[in-house]
Amino acid sequence: MDRRQFLAHSSVAGLATLASRTAFAATLTDGGRVRRALGIPELRPVFERAPLRMPPSVSADGLTLRAAARRVEIAPGVPVEAWSPGDGPVGPTIRVRTGDTARITLENALNEPTILHWHGLRVPEIADGHPRLAIPTGATYQYEFPVIDRAGTYWYHAHPHHRTGVQAYRGMAGLLVIGDAAEDALGFPNGEHELPLLIQDRRLAADGTFAYEPAMHEQMEGFFGDTAFANGIRLPSQSVETTTYRVRVVNGTTSRILRLALSNGQPFTLIGNDGGLLPAPVTLTQIDMGTGERVDVLIDFGKVAVGSRVMLMSAAFESPARMGGMGMGRGMGGGGMGMGRMGAGGVAQGAAMDLVEFTVDRAVTPVAWNPRALPRIATLDPRTAKRTRTFQFNSAMMQHNINGREFDMERIDETVRFGDTEVWTFVNDSPFPHPVHMHEVQFRVVERIGGRARIMPWERGLKDVVLVNPGERVSVVATFDTYRGRFLMHCHNMVHEDMGMMMNYAIV
Ligand code: C2O
Ligand code: CU
């Protein structure tokens, strides 16, 4: 039974709840015919799917990124004004090898200050893109740093204070892929069988521009687009062969948690996450990702019939946000904020969203990737920690802060001794999920108490973002032994971050 038959069947049988019908409807690409037949309201204007395009791959040696407002195509013949560090709707894909030296010039031709941060990379303080390093219009910034991190999927994005959200949303972001010899030896699919995807969600204004005006309730929970983009392409479609692909996914949304799934129910082989390859591959049908998190998965189209389509989607889920509970009702003057997942036309956290359509077009002799040992990761043992620090993530009354303090560019909130291993515990008693990001370290998640109460399979290995849901307390262990200087820890929900849920820490 294919998906359409299943849909018709479930409608006839009256099995589908509104939620699941909406989820299925959102996965359809037939111009809304089935949706109308089922009496499901339109979720958004129905656009044609556009061919996915890969941003150009560039080396980091002598790279110039010119940040500018420019007209770019988000689909063939559909120009939109984006703010981008390259010629396309997002920046070029920077491909480097461990041991390379990056020499990158940022030119700011935007009408406001900007700075770029190399998310997940351990770099010297002056190369980290701290908001106090933002440069004015017309200025340039010179980055030079050795690439010391492992092979993996990283990314870069604008990081000026109060403007990270809008700038990244308009296109000031790109993929950064590190390769190394240990990974080469594993023979993962590469070339056209490797698909890096920077996923974003946006709203298109009536005039076709990217609309970003978080309303009052969106300044609390976050800003959710109604339309998915990958690599700056709206509702993309990618033609694939009947073989295994390596798909690298970056959650580059403003605020949206993605629950990655394939529409035909087939599993992913998860091989890596934020900090590179996992200790061992894991087979999963669903993977949750907060903003800033990455996953590296193998998708085997070898058993998919030629001529069929498989949607990489964010499956519907119950938002972990606690509407009307906790601070919400008190802080917002009455809990009923009208943020119902259905009522918002598929916009809200947890609504199903199609991300990238794969059309299986060509039969080839499938090349399977056979599981084999992945490179060992040095174990970070929390028992060696010199210190434990606890951080409360608070959201109430139009405020987002850490330990009661909003971000201050010049204030150092924590001081860590160079070389020490520490355990940092992120506590979320607020109504909203917070994807917590640390600059300058790759940490290991050691414990989650409350909420999901376990370490999720996609949280093994090395990470730089961890999703902390309401009611959870998540501990991570890290060694601060790369560079001294001032670095950031913050919530990567960019609305929260821009409103001050961020702090400086110094490694001395
Ligand atoms: Cu992805 Cu401080 O950033
Ligand atoms: Cu947050």
Image (cartoon, rainbow, N blue to C red):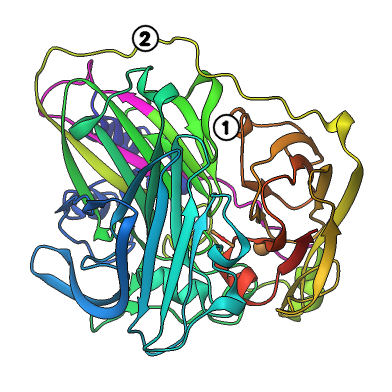
Residue 495 to residue 349: above or below:
below
Q: Where is residue 342 in the image (x, y as percent from the top left)?
A: 48, 59
Q: Position of residue 256 (x, y in %)?
A: 51, 57
Contact between labelled residues 1 and 2, with CB atoms less than 8 Å apart: no
Residue type pointed to by label 2: Asn
Label 2 vs 1, first from the N-terminus: 2
Does the magenta-highlighted stretch encompass residue 434?
A: no
Number of other residues with Cα within 10 Å of mark 1, as a class: few under 14, some 14 to 19, many 20 or more: many
At 63% from the left and 69% from the top, the residue drawn is: 497
Q: Where is residue 31 in the image (x, y as percent from the top left)?
A: 17, 55
**Whether residue 113 can be seen here:** yes
- Give the image quarter of residue 182: top left
- Disc 2 on helix, strand or loop? loop
Write down the region rendered in magenta: 298-325
Residue type pointed to by label 1: Trp
Does the magenta-highlighted stretch encompass residue 309?
A: yes
* Residue indicated by mark 2: 370
Residue 44 to residue 155: above or below:
below
State the residue in front, 61 or 31.
61
Task: Report the quarter where the N terminus lies.
Answer: top left
Task: Please give the label number shown on residue 259.
Answer: none
Number of other residues with Cα within 10 Å of mark 2, as a class: few under 14, some 14 to 19, many 20 or more: few
* Residue indicated by mark 1: 458
